[in-house]
Image (cartoon, rainbow, N blue to C red):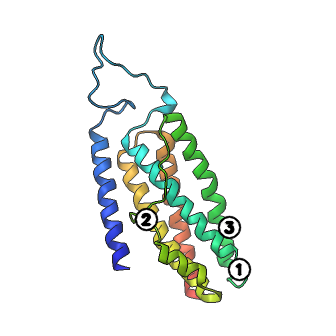
Amino acid sequence: MRKLRTIALTSSAVLAAALVLAGCAPQDGTMPGMDHGPGGMTETTEPAAEFNAADEMFVTMMIPHHQQAIDMADIVLAKTDVDPQVTELAQQIKDAQGPEIETMRGWLADWGVEEPMGGMDHGDGMMSENDMTALEDASGPEASRLFLEQMIVHHQGAIEMAEMALDAAQNPDVTALATQVIEDQTAEITTMRDLLATL
């Protein structure tokens, strides 16, 4: 757990630094260092495609973060001996985050940004391979407990990412999603803590 916390803090520091840099960048979706004067290099951006480094960072990090939450939910949904309230929550998480992934991929396509390949391994609540294996191997009440404990940490990482994005993101769709992530996942954390107390 200490290792996971260290990784998460390092990752948060990287994201925070990126967002600070984003705050110093032009807010019109263009790249810094371009000559926008007469005869210089110019770039036009449709209003819907306006974004900055903070928008891009949030979206490219949140897609694999959401995907792992879905993977965790799928593991639990494949089990037959998990508390029904836990499987209901897992389905709720999957149903919410799947469409959000597609929405974010659409934004990247609109911005001309390629989705990074591979998963995340830099913290922000992300589970390690060992964590995922432990969840796969668990059964019954232990599986329910482990899923809830892991997903609380996972949600807390997403909330931190969303809060940092709100400080520097420019695209209104991105800030709306970040706000929704904070609201939805804060409520789910409360639900998960209540469920843990009943196990």
View extreme (front): residue? 118
In the image, what residue type sits under mark 2? Gly
Q: Height in image: 36 above or below 12?
A: above
Measured Cα–Cα span from mark 1 to mark 3 = 11 Å
Q: Position of residue 134 (x, y in %)?
A: 53, 81
Q: Residue at x 52, y 72 (%)?
A: 151
Q: Are marks 2 and 1 in contact (CB under 8 Å)?
A: no
Tag 2, which secondary structure? helix
Q: Which residue is mark 3?
A: 91
| Callout 3 crowding tier (Cα within 10 Å): few <14, some 14–19, many ≥20 | some
Q: Quadrant of residue 85?
A: bottom right
Whichever of callouts 1 and 3 sits on the residue coming sooner in the sequence is: 1
What amino acid is found at the position of numbered circle 3 in the picture? Gln
Q: Residues within 10 Å of mark 1 (few under 14, many from 20)?
A: few
First-in-chain label (2 vs 3): 3
Q: CA distance from mark 2 to mark 1?
A: 25 Å
Mark positioned earlier in the residue sequence (2 or 1): 1
> Secondary structure beneath disc 1?
helix
- Identify which residue, 83 or 7, lies in the foreground: 7
Q: How many marks?
A: 3
Q: Label 2 to label 3, Cα distance in Å?
A: 20 Å
Quick check: marks 2 and 3 in contact, CB under 8 Å?
no
Q: Is residue 122 above or below residue 82?
A: above
Residue type beneath disc 1 = Pro
Q: Which residue is mark 2?
A: 157
Residue 193 can be seen in this image: no
Residue 126 in the image, given as x and y percentages of width and height: 46, 67
Q: Is residue 1 above or below residue 42?
A: below
Quarter where residue 71 is shown: bottom right
- Bin the neighbour count of mark 2 within 10 Å (Cα to Cα): few under 14, some 14-19, many 20 and up: many
Q: On the image, numbered disc 1 is attached to which residue?
A: 84
